[in-house]
Amino acid sequence: MNTITRVFRHVAALGLIALAGCATVAPSRDDAQWAATAPVEPPQPAVADGAIYHDNQNMELFVDPRAHRVGDILTVVLQESTQASKKASTSTSKKDKTAIDAPTLLGKAVTFNGNPASIGLSGDRSFSGDGSSTQSNQLSGQITVTVAQRLSNGNLVVRGEKWLTINQGKELIRISGIVRPQDINPDNSVASSRVADARIAYTGRGSLADANTQGWLSRFFNSKWMPF
């Protein structure tokens, strides 16, 4: 078997492995379908309707309108405001000085080229460093989400998103988390600060977002992999 045949077989084997890997990878889910994948309640057994009462046409006059079932909607009031500040300062200084007089021989100081053979050492080292960091974030607004799951303790798993298309860009607000029924207000709203395990994302896409993003080469020079 010559070298060309071996190379061809290796390339073919790698190609088959790559195709098998692609076949096992699940297709990526489109972002627009993210909020539409809430689990559906299991089908309930059919109930025989009476001559006057119809289950699908009943009117719940005295039921709490707040979200409590899978599929109900809930308004989350975004009230996110965070501030952080950090400052550090370090300063060190050290000085060393050592002197050794010239030794004496027969009562006279030893000289070298007419100069006393004395030794003197001195050192001066210092370091000073300052660092500070300040960050402030604020997000306000409202977003209506869907109850995706009801836990065994009664808490509600909610998630939802909102897309806004404005001129040359798109704005996306996405939130998910766990809400206690006790924290839901009578108007069927809950503050985002009351959402447990909250994951809130506010991003943008389009020409405006691209203009505010560094290119891949600039990100490399500003990354930790840059040795200088």
Image (spheres, helix red, strand yellow):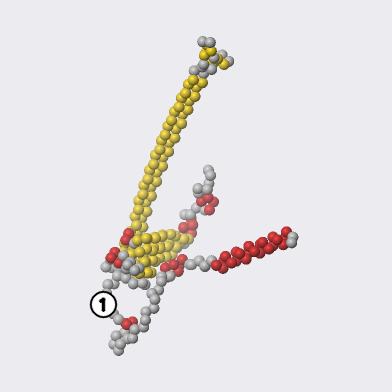
Give, as a three-letter code, the residue at label 1: Leu
In the picture of the structure, the residue carrying the numbered disc 1 is 61
- Image x and y of residue 127, in percent: 44, 35
Secondary structure of residue under mark 1:
loop
| Residue 155 found in image quarter | bottom left
162, 115: nearer the viewer: 115
In this view of the protein, which residue sits in the foreground, 182 or 217? Answer: 182
Outermost residue toward the front? 106
Q: Which residue is at 51% across, 51% downward?
A: 219
Q: Position of residue 54 (x, y in %)?
A: 31, 84
- Outermost residue on the right side: it is 2
- Estimate the x, y position of residue 51 in percent, counting from the top left: 30, 89
Q: Which of the two residues, 114 or 117, is positioned nearer the viewer here?
A: 117
Q: To which quarter of the image does residue 71 belong?
A: bottom left
Q: Could you tell me if residue 195 is visible in this image? A: yes
Q: In which quarter of the image is the N terminus?
A: bottom right
* Residue 27 as seen in the image, left or right of residue 91: right
Name the residue at 53% across, 53% down. 216
Which residue sits at x=42%, y=65%? 163
